[in-house]
Structures are given as structure tokens and as C-alpha cells.
Image (cartoon, rainbow, N blue to C red):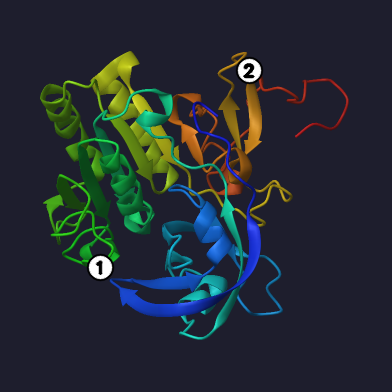
Amino acid sequence: MGGAPEVPQGVQELAEVVSARPVGAYTHLVLRAPEAARRARPGQFVACGTGDSGMLLRRSLSLHAADPEAGTLEVVVAAAGPGTRLLAAKRPGDVVPTTAPLGRPFPLPADVGRPGAPAVVIGGGYGAAPLPWLARELAATGSRVVGIVGAASADRLLGTSAVDEATALDGPDGPADALVVTTDDGSLGAPGRVTDALPEVLLELSELSDRGDPWVYACGPMPMLRSVQTTTRGVLGERARTWLAVEESMACGVGVCMTCVLPVVSPDDGATRMLRACTAGPVFDGDALRWDAIGAAEHLRGGALVPDDAVGAPVAGGPAGGH
């Protein structure tokens, strides 16, 4: 939606683990999946089987990179639960069942006739995983790219050469023109959150560029994405363009289970519809997300409510059913 091009369906492959290494608090895996590597674009994800027959559902991971020539996909795994701990423990030669690429990618300014528009890429924690690949794609079309990465503490950072050169936005081979690092506790970079640094970056890029205001790309937890949207709107107003990769829980990854549904405003008719993040996203236009309903469902630990004006929403006093 909102300018993102149509993409091929994901394919199932038994991917061999080519390499596995620690990157800060995370594990970086390289998987041999030739067909998926040929199709993948920044912002998409892969659904990985854990290898445990007791865990039927696959784990959805953002793609860090794809190399069509080598036939490989790269992911960064945060060992947060039993399934991701199993994936983080994989070693070269192990086999991981995969379905990829899934979801819709980040649109580029060049996709809508604005090649070279400046860009800000923002990541929180391991949410920074897709950003170096995205930044390389942006730079290849002439965009000046500034990165902002942050985390609660230095050990949870990703995307900076201070943690790891190979997955960094900065450094000798890094694709970003500049990188700002923040940590909540001040253990590395500037103390504070990524959005504390965002207004100055937006204003500076706008002044330096002769190709319009910057596009903002972000990936991370929903509260961070909300803050990115609010901050960008506050600085750029109606000129703001934000593309946000949500980290909703995706139990199936292919649109069957309905666990990742979000309220999204259609650009065609202005109506709000409950859309699956795994198929309509995970990348959404920040203006299209109904922030008044996202994070408001306390019984779902922060999930989204169905707005009263959403298509198909239950009507008070009406028949039972609906969402």
C-alpha cells in the first residue's frame, strides 16, 4: 500500500546454516536459501522453523540482508523465548525450514519518481537489522542517508561499528553518510532515545538537500514507532513521509492466524480496515496507522483495538459477531 510495489510470494526452502556468530547480545545467521535470496527486498521477513516438533509455529525474523549471487539470507536473532533460543543456537551445517520473502518491503523514493530524496533510517535494538541493507539501496539511487540507532543499553545495540563492523551503518564500508547512536542509560553514544536526536537530523537534512524533505524509515517496538511518527510530523508537518516496519507478533507469518491485525486507513476511500501486518505490512505508511487504537488493548498487552468506525466493527446493540 501507499506506493510499495507488488512483490512475489514467499517460497519454502530447507535452508542450510552457512555461518552463525554473536553480534552484541544477538546472533547473526547466514542461511542458504537461493530462491528467497533472489526475490527478497529490504523490509521483508522470513518465517523460520525451530527444528522442535513441539513448536508448530515458525518464528518471523526481519531480513538483515540477501545476496542473490551467493544465494543467502541473513538474519539477526534475539533469543527472547524458547523458539528464538533454538534458532540462536543453530550452527553451520544445521538446516532451518524457511518461508521467504514474506510481507511488503520498504518503498524507495525512486519508486515514486523521487530518486535521491534524503532519508533517515531509525532502529531500536535488533530492529536496526534491516537498516544497512535499506541504506545501501537508498544510497544506490543517490539518497543522502543518516542513521539513528538506539537501545536501552550498549549491549542491546545493533547497527553501529562500535558493536560490529559487518552489520553496521557506519564505518569504512557502512552505507550511511552519518550515524547517531543513543542509549537510554548513556552507556554508549548520546544519553536518551532515538527520537531525541531526530528533530535536529530532520532539519539539517532538509537544509542540506535540494531534493526535498527527508523520508523517514523506522523499525522497532511500537512505542518507538509512534514516537518517530509524532516527532516527524511535528517537525515536517504535512510534508512528512514515514515508513514504519512494525514488530507485531506474527504467529503464522502468512495471514492465516490473524494475531497481527492492525487498524489501517485506506488511501483510496479513507476507511479504516483491520489488516494483517504480515501480509499488508510489515511496512506501513505512518500516516495510515490508527494510533488512537494501537496499544490501547490492555488485555492484549498493548495490542490494537477495533475502532468503532472500522469496516466490519461490531455495532452496539447489534447482532453478535464481528471482530
| Quadrant into which the C terminus falls | top right
Q: Is residue 240 above or below residue 96?
A: above
The mark nearer the N terminus, 2 or 1, is 1
* Pick the front one: 307 or 133: 133
In the shown orientation, is residue 274 left or right of residue 68?
Answer: right
Left or right of 52 on screen, residue 235: left
C-alpha separation, residue under disc 2 versus residue under disc 1:
42 Å
Q: Could you tell me which secondary element the residue under label 2 belongs to? A: loop
Quick one: 215 or 296, which is closer to the camera?
Answer: 215
The N terminus, quarter of image: top right
Q: Where does label 1 land, which residue?
A: 155
Q: Residue at x 22, y 50 (%)?
A: 175
Give how far across and how far down residue 66 sits, in percent.
43, 59
Local crowd size for mark 1, using a 10 Å CA cut-off: few (<14), some (14–19), many (≥20): some
Can you tell which quarter of the image residue 156 is in?
bottom left
Residue 271's disc is 2
Q: Amino acid at mark 2?
A: Ala
Vertically, is 160 above or below 300?
below
Pinpoint residue 224: horizontal percent, then vertical percent. 36, 42
Q: Which amino acid type is marked by label 1?
A: Asp
